[in-house]
Amino acid sequence: ATKEDRGLDLGGAAGSSMLRSRALAAAFLSHLVGASAFSVMSGLTAIEKVATPQNLAAVDGLEPANLWRSFAAIASIPRPSKKEERVLEFLKSFAKERGLATKEDAVGNLVILAPGRNGGENAKPVVLQGHVDMVCEKNSDTVFDFDADPIRLMMASEWLTADGTTLGADNGIGCATILALLMDDTATLPPLECLFTIDEETGMTGAIDFDASMITGDTLINLDTEEFGSVYVGCAGGGDSKLYFGGLTREPVAPGLVPKTLKISGLVGGHSGVNIHEGRGNAIMMACSCLKQIVSAVPEVRLAELNAGDKHNAICREAIGTICVPEGKVDAVLAALEHAQAAAQAEYGLLETKMKFELLDADSATDNFEVLTALSAAKLYHAVLALPHGVIKMSAAMKDLVETSNNVAVIRLPKSGDTASLLTSTRSNVPQALEAARDRLEAVTRLAGGRIEREDAYPGWNPNMASPVLGVAKRAFNQLLQKDPEVIAIHAGLECGLLGDKKPGLDMVSLGPTITGAHSPDEQLLVSTVPPFYDAVALMLKELAHRPQ
């Protein structure tokens, strides 16, 4: 690596300032002329070619500099799940300019191979792992194209966040940590097998289809958890279910009915594993509860359309539907809606301080669509309200751990057709309990005359409290913080379960800096936890570098 690549040996503050100015200028020129034209210009690193001026400026002065510059670059590359080609090309370019070999499997998972250094040349290889995709969520009033636009990083006091969108620290900060370690010539490292997986956020298909022959190490450090000071040793398994309610009957809009938009917004949302125990509101369930109360107050109201949710692993934040209302009874519908919001505020008000229930003028004329009959609409919203959502059971084996939960994640009722569909995500660290919860989903669906498709479940990760790498992590945290880390399991799904299933005997832990609001536009990264997180990983690798082959 060159001195510019390392960003550490340029002669104190003046050198660091020179490097930052060069990186900002490079990013500005790249923004003006485009990455393809700019890439032919000499002397630019892979990071400088892709990082935007705004993102580099947002992290300017933060340490470790190479980690933050790497994250600024990753955040500048559009990387929705299943569309990771551009970030993988960036990683390959990064490896190539450092003379590091790479491997890639059939689905796109990438491994960068780095030899040991500074005394770790003859140690056993260690796998560092993160995923390159991100959850793509934005506020409804934010104009943003996740397929084309760079994330816009912003500092907010002690937190790094994004402008109206998810930040992508899940798991961009883990990937950036790996790149920073590869640039750290002073670190004592064992041979590293740096595994970057794809499509973690929409089904973990990268880990499911991972070719385990690409790695030889028997120790893996996953960098995809979100609470600094904790080391994770287990996670939930999970499985999605698709519910279809067909045979819904439509009819023409009756004379005197006018279309209105029913909108539920302002909910906190969040990760359906990490935050499910907090009892946050779900816009799908709230919308169906509103419909029930509105129709009870004004039976002539008809439902035409309802759409909410986007990701299986996000708690639904917004719902938008089209209902047709008697022209002379709009005030009565508004009163029912206000009553529904008051009930929701009584239940969720301390958590959902920005919750809004609105009845708005609709854009479309009633001759453009038909509405569900009263009976069909009632069948649908009653079925949805009967579905389990939230915590189903707490663990008896580990205190404060959710054992089993279900997230009602997505609903689609288009303005035409006779079928509504839902997507749910069920999690459990007990396989039998997972399937029992999905049996309940099937029972409700069948009672309502629907059908269900249960996708194959992915395995959980059973804790091993005698894990050798857990001992390494404890010693590293003791050295840094003078206390043991909290050793816990997480209700979210980590790729560790799948990777361990692919490579039996793999000894694993997971750790990360503090991230809140993951999977929502409220996602933010606590900047002060990033340096000690990096130091903890470096200390773990230093000890593992002295482990003989």
Image (spheres, rainbow, N blue to C red):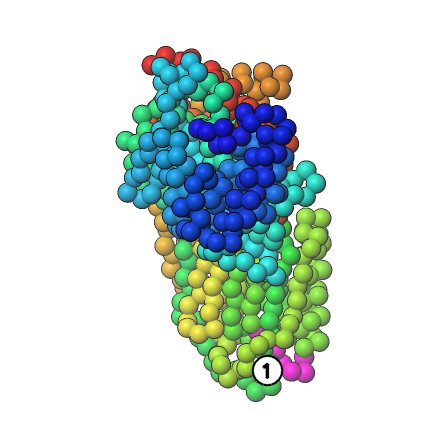
> Secondary structure under badge 1?
strand
Other-residue count near label 1 (Cα within 10 Å), few / some / many at <14 / 14–19 / ≥20: some
Residue 415 x, y percent position in the rendering: 47, 73
Residue 387 x, y percent position in the rendering: 50, 54
Which residue lies under the disc numbered 1?
257
Going by the numbered disc 1, the residue's amino acid type is Leu
Quadrant in the picture for residue 536: top right
Q: Does 370 sit left or right of 21 as displayed?
A: left
Q: Residue furthest bottom?
A: 255
* Camera-nearest residue between 244 and 77: 77
Q: Which residue lies furthest to the front in this view?
A: 42
**Which residue is depicted at the point 50% across and 22% down?**
538
The reply to whether residue 154 is in sight is yes
Residue 223 x, y percent position in the rendering: 48, 32
* Camera-nearest residue between 220 and 163: 163
Q: Does the magenta stretch include residue 213?
A: no
Q: Give the range drawn in magenta.
A: 323-329
